[in-house]
Structure formats: structure tokens, C-alpha cells
Image (tube, grey):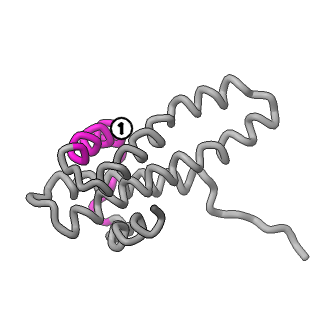
Amino acid sequence: MGRVIHTESAGKNRLRLMKGVALAVRQLAQQREAGEEARDLAAFIALALEQIAAGVDESVAAWEKRDYWVKADRFRMEWAWAAQLGAGMRAAVLAGDWAAVAQIAAQVAQKVGHVTVPPGHRLGRPWVGAWKALRKGR
């Protein structure tokens, strides 16, 4: 049996999720009312931020093996916002607190403002069905 090669690293996954979050935040800002699509968008942002936060430890594992503790800690501190805002967005969406969703979405927009999503992206609409997934994972 040969080696298993993972082509989907934590960094690639994080970049893909960041592009999806940037796209979702921009779409959420255009929503006029708290309908089904707005719930899906907010739920996707919460789930994606939680996945980003979960991937941080996977990214720093190689640095910790080589005793680069400072670099690993700096990276964790740089991405700590994802876990905080993801948990806040999850709580706000499940509670139906749209004022809090708007406030957290604005904070997320500041963090992902530098992410460029080209007009011909192949991301599609990754937020479709996110509300059901968020409610399932309560």
C-alpha cells in the first residue's frame, strides 16, 4: 500500500473558506430583510468561521514539532478572532437576534475585507442549506 497524499491542506481549506465568507458577508449586506437566504448566509458564516478556527491547530502542528512555539502562538493569536466571531454568530443566528448578526457581520467584513473574490469565481453559493446544518449541529 502506498502513501496517502493529502492535497487539501489546512491552508488551502482556510483560503477557500475565507473566500466563501467574504462572498457571504457581501451578500448578507445586500439583504433587505431577514428571510431564508439571510438565515442561510449568517449560518454559513458561523459554520465557516468555526471550521477556520478548527484548522488553525492543524496548521501549527508542524511548527510545534520543530519547537517553533513563538511562531505557533503568534499564528493562533492572529486567527483567534475566527473562533470568537463564529461562536457569536452561531448564538445570534440561533436566537434570531438580527441586530447582533449585523454587528458581527460588520466585524467579520473588517477581517475579510482584504480577500479578493474574482467575478468568475467557482465557489457557487456555498451557503445554501447552511441553516439546516447549523440547526442539526446544535
Residue at horizontal 37%, vertical 44%? 88
Q: Quadrant of the C terminus?
A: bottom left
Locate residue 43 relative to residue 12 in the image: left or right.
left
Furthest-right residue in this view: 1
Examine the rendered structure and indicate whether residue 68 appears above or below residue 12.
above
- The percent position of residue 26, horizontal first and vertical second, equals 23, 53
Locate residue 54 relative to residue 98 in the image: left or right.
right
Q: Quadrant of the N terminus?
A: bottom right
- The percent position of residue 28, horizontal first and vertical second, equals 21, 56
Task: Report the front residue among 34 and 69.
Answer: 34
The magenta-colored residue range is 100-120
Residue at horizontal 19%, vertical 50%? 98
Whether residue 127 appears in magenta in the rendering, the answer is no
Task: Report the front residue among 21 and 37.
Answer: 37
Task: Report the front residue among 91 and 71.
Answer: 91
Whether residue 101 appears in magenta in the rendering, the answer is yes
Furthest-left residue in this view: 32
Tally of numbered tags = 1
Furthest-top residue in this view: 70
Examine the rendered structure and indicate whether residue 69 appears above or below residue 94.
above
Locate residue 28 relative to residue 11 in the image: left or right.
left
Element marked by disc 1? helix
- The percent position of residue 131, horizontal first and vertical second, equals 34, 67
What kind of residue is marked 1?
Answer: Lys
Residue at horizontal 48%, vertical 65%? 137
Residue at horizontal 29%, vertical 37%? 107
Residue that badge 1 annotates: 111
- The percent position of residue 55, horizontal first and vertical second, equals 59, 49
